[in-house]
Image (spheres, rainbow, N blue to C red):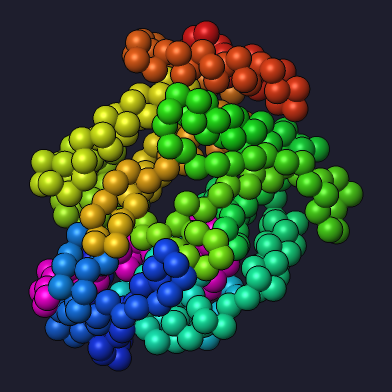
Amino acid sequence: MDTRGDRHQHERVSSPISISRVRRDGQVERLGQWLHEERVLELEREGFPFLGPGRHQLESELPWIFWDMCPSGYLGRRLQAQMPALRLADNPRDWMAGDVLRALSLAGADLAGSLLIGEESVQAFHAWTSTDFAKAFEEAMRASVQTSGPSSLGGERPKVLYSHMLAKFAPPSTSPQGQRWSDLLRVEALCSQTLHSAGVLAAVSQAQFVAIPGETFGRTILFVDRFDRLPPRGRVGVGTLYWLAMDRWGDVALPAPEVLARLHAEGLVDAQSVEVCTKVHAFSAAIGNNDAHLGNYALLFDDTGRATLAPIYDVLPMVLAPRNDELPDAWLTPRTTPIDASIAPWVETLVRAVDADLEISADFKARWRSHIGV
């Protein structure tokens, strides 16, 4: 469990810190300010997740959405390496409240969601151009080449947010681990397509084999449309369930459907969001996704701060993913739990799509089908 929010922060943080929002039309409006020493959120208008105008005294060290916005994993490590002036620890899990506020206010022009923390983020947003987006993608491709071994520290996959896309990079397919990640990214795209065909709103994605500058062999890249971006410069509020559950209940091990059910009981999300989340969670279990944690489910926030379930993303059979750069095949056993009848057609559709994809290895297809029992 990540406990950054519980650690004492000795460094004083300048206060107040402005909070602005990029609307769907690309215009920026001020929402209010964060008084860090007092732990007070002063909001002037609607638009902040779950909170309306007024003065809100918080018990937590930061609003949960601040922790959620801050880059983590591979993206957090890239930020630390690219901006040493931020004085961030090498591991984002060690970042404390002051570190998060520096990252949000000094490097927060293009983070997930619609909020801009600090005036410098607002200025940087106005100065952002498509050239910056293209440069970010080129840098990410070079970084994926330079990553030592098949995966980065902690097993996190190289990725980049740029323009209206998220790109995930597989290692070169010349190694067993690289081929496995290539297979997984292709299946991830097929999972999204399967959910779409079943009427579930899922992130639009496409897997492509791309030549990488500096490499003899190319690699598979999964391009995912960012559902928190609207062309040309509009944004949509978004937040994962992870930090929300940490803030409200201090428990990030809760199943996503239970979190949605609790929020529905409080009148914060609609019943359809709970129903869809429950079925998608069952689908994940049926196809061998053992990584359906709260960070892989999100909410979209409208202009008033009310929420609905975000498009589904990161659904793939992670039980077959390399662990510490080793294939888990020797430990795979057939799944024993029965497939829920309501999502059985989804599984059948996915199996047909995987079988028809000639770019997915025969070895992967056989091992995956054996594991899920179809």
Count of marks, rendered view: 0
Q: Residue at x 65, y 71 (%)?
A: 130
Location of residue 114 (image quadrant): bottom left
Asked if 189 appears above or below 153 in the picture, the reply is above
For residue 374, above or below residue 360: above
Residue 16 as seen in the image, left or right of residue 262: right
x 52%, y 68%: residue: 233
Q: Which residues are magenta?
A: 54-80
In-image side of 54 versus 163 (left or right)? left
Residue placed most toward the observer, 297 or 151: 297
Instruction: Choose between 165 and 185: the one closer to the eye.
Output: 165
Placement of 352 over or under 235, stated as above or below: above
Instruction: From the top left corner, tell me how far across and down residue 360 is, in percent.
Output: 70, 26
Q: Nearer the viewer, residue 143 or 323?
A: 143
Q: In the image, 367: left or right of 38?
A: right
Q: Is residue 77 magenta?
A: yes
Residue 329 seen in the figure: yes
Is 285 within the magenta? no
The reply to whether residue 333 is visible in this rendering is no
Q: Residue at x 37, y 46 (%)?
A: 310
Counting from the top left corner in percent of width and height, residue 274 is at 25, 35
**From what the image shows, is residue 342 above or below residue 52?**
above
- Which residue is depicted at the point 41% across and 71% down? 22
Find residue 333 and report its horizontal and vertical position in percent: 49, 15
Closest to the observer, 361 or 162: 162
Residue 268 percent location from the top left of the image = 17, 49
Query: Which residue, as the protein is rendered here, is positioned at the far right?
Result: 216
